[in-house]
Amino acid sequence: MTKYEEFLVEKGLFIMAILSIVVIVLIIGFIFQQGFPAMDQIGILKFIFGMNWSPSDDQYGVFTMIIGSLGITALSLLFAVPLSLCCAIFLAELAPRTVRRILKPVIETLAGIPSVVYGFFGLIVLVPIMRVYFGGTGFSMLAASLILTVMVLPTIISISEDALKSVPVEYKEASLALGATHWQTIRNVIFPAAIPGIITAIILGMGRAIGETLAVIMVAGNVAQIPNSIFDPVRALTSNIALEMGYATGLHYSALFATGIVLFIMIIILLIIANYFHYKKKVVIGGGYL
């Protein structure tokens, strides 16, 4: 490649990067422009901590939906994290090559399945099972969490596996040379050294879960309430926007954009935490820092 071609490639990539940033800034600016009038008219605290969402009565409070989103996300991570970490450790350190070649594409395929397929499976299969064995309508926070568990598994597994594989091989060799077994090496050396990447994987999985819309709409029940148990129906922030944006006008329309602002801020906080652990976290191993 000549210097002229290198120059064109470099400038082309730079322009594409700038355009990506501009598009993101324009989207964020549009959301805030449309949502701030509602926050200003309703009041930021009243909007965020309000318990009632009833557009027909001009009541706009998203606190129940914030709780719903966080509850669904937390429960899904409670199921997904142990499964994901076990699978990542197996793929990175224990699986035979043949098994890895089969299991890895299967996990990657899970990430490519459309969310509507997950939601449809939950609606047709999971919700009736929940109704029979746990009572109620079957639409619940637990049902939504189980669907999200499967949806976030590929993200956490893939990034955690990369984190485990990125640990310098010298650490593993030194541990084995000192007489540790393979499992002791994984538990006491490799896993602690990979913790920053694993935490990043968990937080990115959390962002994936909290931003999911269609699958949650289909199985969560979409009732704006603070649930008394995991078997109660809930409404997430994303579901609220998707369900009502088609017919909203005036203050209602602006309030839905304000809901998007709240969701955006929640995701930004998660990304900041992920970047902090990715770049700043230091793990002490044998008196040194990784």
Image (cartoon, helix red, strand yellow):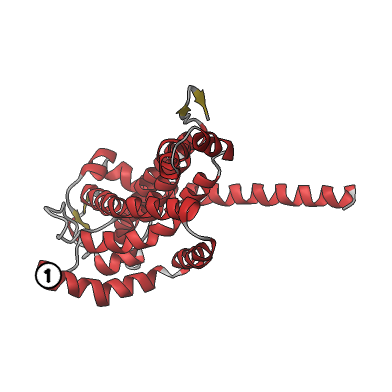
**Disc 1 element:** helix
* 213 or 124: nearer the viewer: 124
Residue 91, image x, y percentages: 47, 56
* 195, above or below 201, in the image: above
Residue 22, percent from left and from top: 60, 48
Q: Furthest residue to the left?
A: 135
Mark 1 neighbour density, 10 Å: few (under 14) some (14–19) many (20 or more): few
Q: Nearer the viewer, residue 210 or 56?
A: 210
Which residue is most to the front?
179
- Give the residue at x 44% y 59%: 154
Residue 103 position in % (x across, y down): 47, 65
Name the residue located 38 percent from the left edge and 52 percent from the top edge.
86
Q: Nearer the viewer, residue 70 or 66?
A: 70
Residue sitting at x 27%, y 40%: 43
Number of numbered discs: 1
View extreme (top): residue: 287
**Vertical placement of residue 269 versus 138, above or below:** above
Residue assigned mark 1: 133
Image quarter of residue 182: top left
Residue 29: percent from the left, percent from the top?
49, 47
Q: Residue at x 78, y 52 (%)?
A: 9
Residue 46 as seen in the image, left or right of residue 148: left
Image position of 126 (left or right of 96): left
Q: Is residue 188 visible?
A: yes
| Amino acid type for the residue under numbered disc 1 | Tyr
Left or right, 249 with reference to 101: left
